Each structure stands twice: as structure tokens, then as C-alpha cells.
């Protein structure tokens, strides 16, 4: 349960925040610190279900798109995903209080210091690593392992609790040992160096998921100046004749209503819906808007462009003896439930199957800046006999039957290489001028040939991890060396075979970013300034993952929260409250 308000028609407040996700929640919390400001959050979704707080249940809320998501799918991909239904994938975004932070896999990864230094180097003042580190620390209540090396990088006493994972299969430790065998250290990758292997810290508090709304909004609902109204899908930003944003139109329980902002409207609807809202409001590429019969208020070509996500490969997998990896029986069995209820530990207390990460540099270049992340998931795709995992990832049935089914019911693990700095760029565009229509989401994965060549190195490294002595002898890992569907005509194991495998099996890591690019005015793709103000209008900011000019080198939840913290300070400064 999450207490919400019902506001009056045509309510007038100081700030309207659209979306209560990873970025919107900190914006709401920080702005409402000023008792003189009235803050209203409009959230399209409703209260999160109880099971969303249980980390081990995370996969259960994913297929339930109708209730807690937008039911988005990507457009059919031209260069990748050939083994997925319609060459596309499901594209979950949380539609509930807490946004995607209430359905995600909870791994807390900040990325690399160079990610932020290069944002600043583009001309985005105030986004260098030294500055953003203050905001990462400000939001954090770190309960992980403190060492002399990492203490300066963590915050204590902030709203967002970050814990060490409370449960791991034998694969968690084996993964770190495999890294050492290959010459890589185990370390806190959110501190001085990101290069090496780790067991992820997680946005979990006392064994319960900490969505951004749980952390930032719920504890502040006693503030009389902070209100959140759920089931309120904003359809349009309203402007006066000077192009100042004065409010929003939204649909609340099937009724069209309006709310007005005396100071600012903040879009924190995420990298799919913030550009969608700008386009519906007449801010975007003129040609696209005209084609859909939307009056152009500002011709801003960058809106919806520069789409970046981290493609990763599923299906590089090994079988292991029973007890080594994750199983649904152990997750949902009576012992697990009792342990969770009495001690908040055990399999239900940790994100399902998320055992370890690694960041390495495979190509020449800055040895402190990774070009590949590897996630080990202690899940075989067929462990559930094809019932949940394969349809959730989105494989065609015949691919499941051909490649995974021969091992179904057996435990196993998957090592997924993920491109941290992809060169491919996609887009978000409107399907129509009807706000109820889902937008066209085109990640355009692997459209840049370099992405495939780098993945080739990534596949080889993943195979090397699985082939370490520790994985083979201590864990008993046996590689799934069946030729994958669609690549059987190629010599198994050759570079061309793996290129084919990559184009068939790579898909999303659910990290859309970049679609309202933050850049100086001289950049024709710029949508927001370094203070996150939308170009060509006033009184309107975008504060969420869409502003990233380049996606960060790791999962995007912690950076989105940091963007919320950073953006809130810009607003406070610009309105004289700091
Ligand atoms: C399945 C999954 C697993 C993931 N795993 C991880 C992980 O382990 N670690 C990690 O770091 N990252 C992970 N991510 C990514 C991470 O959660 C996102 O990058 C991050 O939450 C994005 O934050 P945001 O504020 O930009 O958007 P969101 O958190 O998505 O917030 C947007 C909010 O706006 C609302 N909204 C949208 N449109 C409207 C509208 N028109 N009117 C009103 N409200 C609206 C939405 O309902 C939502 O609440 C995962 C994501 C998914 C989907």
C-alpha cells in the first residue's frame, strides 16, 4: 500500500512532476524540502503490489505488463534479435509508483567516472565525476562492506538504502574466483576503480526492495506540501503564448483533467515517455509532428533521437549439477518462505539469479574505462521447462525447443556480455497523435558493425570465464555447445558462427537512455541544457534517464536517481532556495 491523494480539478501548485520513478521520486522529495513550495507528482500507474517488494519475486511482476507496465514492444529489429518473436522484444517499463525502480533487478551500479567526465567534456557544466559523486553519496545509505578503499565513495544516512546481497548460490563466489583465475580483482566497482569482478550491491533494505518512491516519497508524505496522485497519465504539456509551460493535461480514471504549475513542469516519465510527451505537446522534429497533424511549437530535431540501450547476449549457457544454481523449487519451497518471513534472508531476499558482474576492457583504449560488462545469472533458460523465463526474454518457441529444451529442468547459468558503450543509435517516435497509442521504440541494435565485432570479443571472454578451472572443476559446469537455431550452416565456433549467434541472440538489458539529449545549444541534437531546461520554451525540464548524452557504463538505476538529485538542485538554485 502506498497512500496517494486525489487533487481538485485545475489545481494550481508550484511544481508538477510527471512520473514517480527513479528520477522523479528524488526530485519530489528534494523540492518539497522547501515548505513554501507546493509539489504535485502525477503518476500514470497505481500502487505497487506487495510481491514487488520481495526481491526474489522480481520475475513475477515482469510478465504482468497490463497491470504494472505499458505493454511496450520494440519495432522488429533489422540487424538483431532474429531468434526472438517478431525480431523484437518486450520492453518493460514500470507503470506504477516507483516506476522502473519498482520492477527492476535492483543491482546498484553507478558506471564509470569517465562516463560523467565525458558528459562534462561535451560542454555540460556541472556533470563531471567529482560533482556527481556528491549526489550519488547524498542519496545513499550504504550498508555494504566498507573498506579503507571504498569509504570515500559511499554515503550513509541518505534516503536510498543499498545493501550487500543477502543470498547467493555457490556460483556467486565461483564467479569471483573465476575472475581472479583470469587475472581480474574482486572489488567494489562503485568506488575507485570499476575494472574487475563483483557481487552486486542492491537497492534493498532489510531484505525488501527499495524502489525510489519507497525511499524518497513515502517517508515524506507527512509533508503537507507534497502530494502524489496515481492513475494519472499526462497526455500533454500546456504552454502560454510565450511558450512558458503552465501545466499539464492528464487522464485520471478516464476523465480528462488539468493541473497548473506556477513555477515549473518537470518531465520524469523515463526515456520512452518523456520524449513521447514532448512530441505530443508539439516540441520535436517539425516534419514528424506535421506528418501526424500535431502543431509544432518548437522545431527540436533531437527529441526522441540518440536512443541508446545496452544490448546483451542471452544464451551463452552452461549446465551444472543440482544445488549449484538457482531453482524455482528452492526459491518457492517452504524452507525459503520460512527463512524469508522469519529472517528476511535466503533466496527470496535477493534478486532472482543475479549473482555477479564484471567490467573489462577488451579493445585498446583507456584501461580504466570498460567496453564490456558481463552478468552471470544463475539461471538456465529451461530450468522452468520453458514456462516463464523464455517467454519473458522473448525467444521464439522453436528456438526454445531446438536450443534450450534438450537441457530443460536442469540447473545452469548464463554469462551475458553487455556492450557498455554501444555505437548504434535508435529512436522513439510517435505512432499517431493519440496519447493512448504506444510509441515506436526502435533500439536499432547492432546497426553499427563495430558493435558486433566488439561482441565477438565479449563472447570469447564469456567462454573463457565458463572454461576456468573453478567453473569446470569446482562447479562442474558443462557448456551448451548445441549449434544455435539459424546458424547451423556455419562452422561451429568460427568467428562467423559467433557473429551469427550475436545477431540472433542479442537483445535489450532494459536500459533505454539518451532520447532527450543534454548538450550545448550548438549541438543540433540537443534537447535540454546542462541545467535540464528544454530548449525553445521556458518553465519545463526533463529530469530522467533520457537526458544522458551517452549511456553510462553499467545499469542505469543509480545514475537515474543521481540525475534526479542533480536536477532538483538546479531547480532550487534557479529559484533561490539554496
Ligand atoms: C526489467 C528491468 C530490470 C532492470 N534492472 C536494473 C538493475 O538491476 N539495475 C539498474 O541499475 N537498472 C535496472 N533497470 C533500469 C532502471 O530501472 C531504469 O534505467 C531506471 O529506473 C530509469 O529511471 P527513470 O526515472 O528514467 O524512469 P522510470 O523509473 O521508468 O520512471 C518513469 C515514471 O514515469 C511514469 N510515467 C510515464 N509516462 C507517464 C505519463 N504520461 N504520465 C504520468 N506518469 C508517467 C511511469 O509510470 C514511471 O513511474 C531495469 C529496468 C527494467 C525494466
Image (tube, helix red, strand yellow):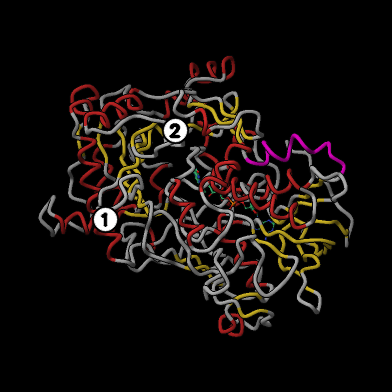
The secondary structure that most of the magenta stretch takes on is: helix
Say which residue label 2 marks: 200
* Dot 2 beta carbon under 8 Å from ligand 1: yes
- Name the residue: 72% across, 62% down: 234
Counting from the top left corner in percent of width and height, residue 518 is at 56, 63
- Name the residue: 38% across, 46% down: 390
Label 2 CA crowd tier, 10 Å (few <14, some 14–19, many 20+): many
Counting from the top left corner in percent of width and height, residue 32 is at 79, 45
Q: Secondary structure at mark 2?
A: loop
Say which residue label 1 marks: 454
In this view, the residue in front, 328 or 358, is 358
Q: Residue 409 falls in which quadrant of the image? A: top left
- Image-based side of 157 in relation to 475, left or right: right
Q: Which part of the image, by quadrant, shows the N terminus?
A: top right
Q: Residue 294 falls in which quadrant of the image? A: bottom right
Residues drawn in magenta: 212-224
Counting from the top left corner in percent of width and height, residue 211 is at 62, 39
- Name the residue: 46% across, 59% down: 550
Vertical side of 15 occupied by 373: above or below: above
- Name the residue: 44% across, 33% down: 200
Going from N to C along the chain, the mark reached first, 2 or 1, is 2
In this view, the residue in front, 550 or 572, is 572
> Does the magenta portion include 218?
yes
Cα distance in 3D space between marks 2 and 1: 24 Å
Vertical side of 342 occupied by 199: above or below: below
Vertical side of 384 occupied by 294: above or below: below
Counting from the top left corner in percent of width and height, residue 554 is at 43, 46
Amino acid at each position: 500500500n502506498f497512500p496517494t491523494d486525489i487533487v481538485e480539478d485545475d489545481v494550481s501548485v508550484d511544481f508538477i512532476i510527471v512520473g514517480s520513478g527513479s528520477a522523479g521520486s528524488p526530485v519530489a522529495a528534494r523540492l518539497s524540502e522547501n515548505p513554501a513550495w507546493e509539489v504535485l507528482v502525477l503518476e500514470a500507474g497505481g500502487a505497487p503490489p506487495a510481491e514487488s517488494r520481495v526481491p526474489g519475486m522480481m520475475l513475477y511482476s515482469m510478465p504482468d505488463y497490463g497491470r504494472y507496465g505499458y505493454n511496450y514492444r520494440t519495432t522488429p529489429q533489422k540487424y538483431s534479435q532474429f531468434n526472438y518473436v517478431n525480431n523484437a522484444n518486450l520492453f518493460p517499463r514500470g507503470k506504477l509508483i516507483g516506476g522502473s525502480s519498482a520492477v527492476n533487478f535492483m543491482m546498484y551500479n553507478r558506471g564509470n567516472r569517465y562516463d560523467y567526465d565525458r558528459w562534462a567534456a561535451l560542454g555540460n557544466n556541472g556533470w563531471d565525476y567529482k560533482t556527481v559523486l556528491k549526489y550519488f553519496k547524498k542519496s545513499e545509505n550504504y550498508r555494504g562492506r566498507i573498506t579503507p578503499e571504498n569509504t570515500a565513495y559511499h554515503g550513509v544516512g541518505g534516503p536510498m538504502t543499498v545493501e550487500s546481497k543477502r543470498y547467493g548460490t555457490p556460483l556467486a563466489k565461483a564467479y569471483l574466483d573465476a575472475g581472479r583465475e583470469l587475472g581480474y580483482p574482486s572489488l567494489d566497482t562503485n568506488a575507485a576503480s570499476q575494472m574487475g569482478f563483483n557481487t552486486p550491491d542492491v537497492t534493498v533494505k532489510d531484505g525488501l526492495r527499495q524502489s525510489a518512491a519507497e525511499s524518497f516519497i513515502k517517508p515524506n508524505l507527512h509533508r503537507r506540501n507534497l502530494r502524489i496522485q496515481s492513475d494519472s497519465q499526462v497526455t500533454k504539456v500546456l504552454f502560454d503564448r510565450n511558450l512558458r509551460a503552465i501545466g499539464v493535461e492528464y487522464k485520471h480514471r478516464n476523465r480528462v483533467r488539468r493541473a497548473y504549475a506556477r513555477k515549473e513542469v518537470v518531465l520524469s516519465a523515463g526515456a520512452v515517455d518523456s520524449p513521447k510527451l514532448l512530441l505530443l505537446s508539439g516540441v520535436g522534429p517539425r516534419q514528424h509532428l506535421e506528418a501526424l497533424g500535431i502543431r509544432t511549437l518548437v522545431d527540436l530535431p533531437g527529441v526522441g533521437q540518440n536512443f541508446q540501450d545496452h544490448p546483451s547476449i542471452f544464451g551463452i549457457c552452461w549446465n551444472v549439477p543440482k544445488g549449484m544454481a538457482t531453482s524455482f523449487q528452492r526459491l518457492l519451497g517452504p524452507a525459503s518462505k520460512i527463512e524469508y518471513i522469519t529472517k528476511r534472508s535466503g533466496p527470496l531476499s535477493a534478486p532472482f539469479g543475479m549473482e555477479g558482474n564484471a567490467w573489462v576492457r577488451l579493445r585498446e583504449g583507456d584501461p580504466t574505462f570498460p567496453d564490456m560488462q558481463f552478468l552471470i545469472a544463475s539461471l538456465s533458460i529451461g530450468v522452468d521447462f520453458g514456462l516463464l523465463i523464455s517467454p519473458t526474454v522473448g525467444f521464439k518457441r522453436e528456438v526454445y525447443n531446438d536450443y534450450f529444451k534438450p537441457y530443460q529442468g536442469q540447473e545452469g547459468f548464463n554469462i551475458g556480455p553487455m556492450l557498455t558503450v554501444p555505437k548504434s543509435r535508435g529512436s522513439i517516435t510517435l505512432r499517431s497523435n493519440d496519447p493512448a497509442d504506444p510509441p515506436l521504440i526502435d533500439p536499432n541494435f547492432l546497426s553499427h558493425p563495430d558493435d558486433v565485432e566488439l561482441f565477438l570479443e565479449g563472447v570469447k571472454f564469456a567462454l573463457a570465464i565458463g572454461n576456468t578451472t573453478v567453473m569446470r572443476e569446482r562447479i562442474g559446469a558443462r557448456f551448451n555447445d548445441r549449434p544455435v537455431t539459424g546458424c547451423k550452416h556455419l562452422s561451429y565456433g568460427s568467428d562467423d558462427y559467433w557473429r551469427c549467434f550475436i545477431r540472433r541472440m542479442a537483445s535489450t538489458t532494459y536500459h533505454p537512455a539518451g532520447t532527450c539529449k543534454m548538450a550545448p545549444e550548438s549541438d543540433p541534437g540537443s534537447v535540454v541544457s546542462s541545467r535540464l531546461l528544454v530548449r525553445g520554451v521556458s518553465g519545463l525540464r526533463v529530469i530522467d534517464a533520457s537526458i544522458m548524452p551517452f549511456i553510462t557504463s553499467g545499469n542505469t538505476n543509480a545514475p537515474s536517481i543521481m540525475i534526479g538529485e542533480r536536477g532538483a538542485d538546479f531547480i532550487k538554485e534557479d529559484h533561490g532556495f539554496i
